């Protein structure tokens, strides 16, 4: 384990796809990532209007409930032709109990007839980290951000990933996010970028303790 890093972190999400990605990204640092459900923590109400606000709501909630360092991310898809929608409502775009398929279907319907040149989109992610053992006045939450730019396809491509991955096309890779293997996706994804930025600041903080 990296010197000074927490040995265990609670991940403030019930999303299994996100949990898999976070565990892969932190595996090299020998940090055990546990879902908040293992501690009986219910998901926090995402009442924020930005990815940053919702990420902090979730990480603070999980840290307070477990007494352990907590990591959260809030992420979503921003589509220019839809005025930034689905945005912070990405997971609930088709309703509070919507499945990934429901959300993708609604997105494709909303973009029906929109030509490829006007289907620009970006995945955005804000990751936050809270350690309840530290004085918040001296050690405020750590933040990492990432953005993955591409466009929305007219139909699904690929079977990997989750969420909007089958309809998000990465022009650099020339494939949809659902056609990338885990390593390639983590190398370029919004979540990978945000967590790498967060890890850099984590290293600085714990080296100073």
Image (cartoon, rainbow, N blue to C red):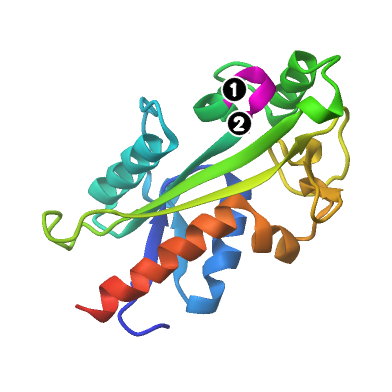
Q: What crowding class fits label 2: few (fewer than 14 Cα within 10 Å), some (14-19), or many (20 or more)?
A: many
Name the residue: 84% across, 45% down: 159
Q: What is the x, y in percent for residue 172?
A: 79, 54
Name the residue: 52% across, 69% down: 26
- The image shows residue 3, relative to residue 104, as above or below, that is below
Name the residue: 48% across, 77% down: 29
Q: What is the x, y in percent for residue 134?
A: 16, 62
Q: What is the x, y in percent for residue 11?
A: 43, 53
Q: What is the x, y in percent for residue 66?
A: 28, 52
- The image shows residue 15, relative to residue 106, as above or below, that is below
Quadrant in which the N terminus is drawn:
bottom left
Asked if the magenta segment contains residue 153, the reply would be no
Name the residue: 60% across, 31% down: 78
Quadrant hosting residue 82? top right
Q: Is residue 82 rendered to the left or right of residue 115?
A: left
Residue 78 shows which numbered tag?
2
Q: Is residue 57 rendered to the left or right of residue 153?
A: left
- Total labels drawn: 2
Residue closest to the eye, 188 or 74? 188
- The image shows residue 31, relative to residue 156, as above or below, that is below
From this viewpoint, is residue 10 visible? yes
Residue 85 shows which numbered tag?
1
From this viewpoint, is residue 41 visible? no
Q: Which residues are magenta?
A: 78-86
- The image shows residue 87, relative to residue 70, as above or below, that is above
Asked whether the residues under the numbered discs 2 and 1 touch, taking CB atoms below 8 Å apart as contact, a structural biologist would say yes
Quadrant hosting residue 131? bottom left
Q: Is residue 16 rendered to the left or right of residue 37?
A: right
Q: Is residue 70 rendered to the left or right of residue 188?
A: left
């Amino acid at each position: 384990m990296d010197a000074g890093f927490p040995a265990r972190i609670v991940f403030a999400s019930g999303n299994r796809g996100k949990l898999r990605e976070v565990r892969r990204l932190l595996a090299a640092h020998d940090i055990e990532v546990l879902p908040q459900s293992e501690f009986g923590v219910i998901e926090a109400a995402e009442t924020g209007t930005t990815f940053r606000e919702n990420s902090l709501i979730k990480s603070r909630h999980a840290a307070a409930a477990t007494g352990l360092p907590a990591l959260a991310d809030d992420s979503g898809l921003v589509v220019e032709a839809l005025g930034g929608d689905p945005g912070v409502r990405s997971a609930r775009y088709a309703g509070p109990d919507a499945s990934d398929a429901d959300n993708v279907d609604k997105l494709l319907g909303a973009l029906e007839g929109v030509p490829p040149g006007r289907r620009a989109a970006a995945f955005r992610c804000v990751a936050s980290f809270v350690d309840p053992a530290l004085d918040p006045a001296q050690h405020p939450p750590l933040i990492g951000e990432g953005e993955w730019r591409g466009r929305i396809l007219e139909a699904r491509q690929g079977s990997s990933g989750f969420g909007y991955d089958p309809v998000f096309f990465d022009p650099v890779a020339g494939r949809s996010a659902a056609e990338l293997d885990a390593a390639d996706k983590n190398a370029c994804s919004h979540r990978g970028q945000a967590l790498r930025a967060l890890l850099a600041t984590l290293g600085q903080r714990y080296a100073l303790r």
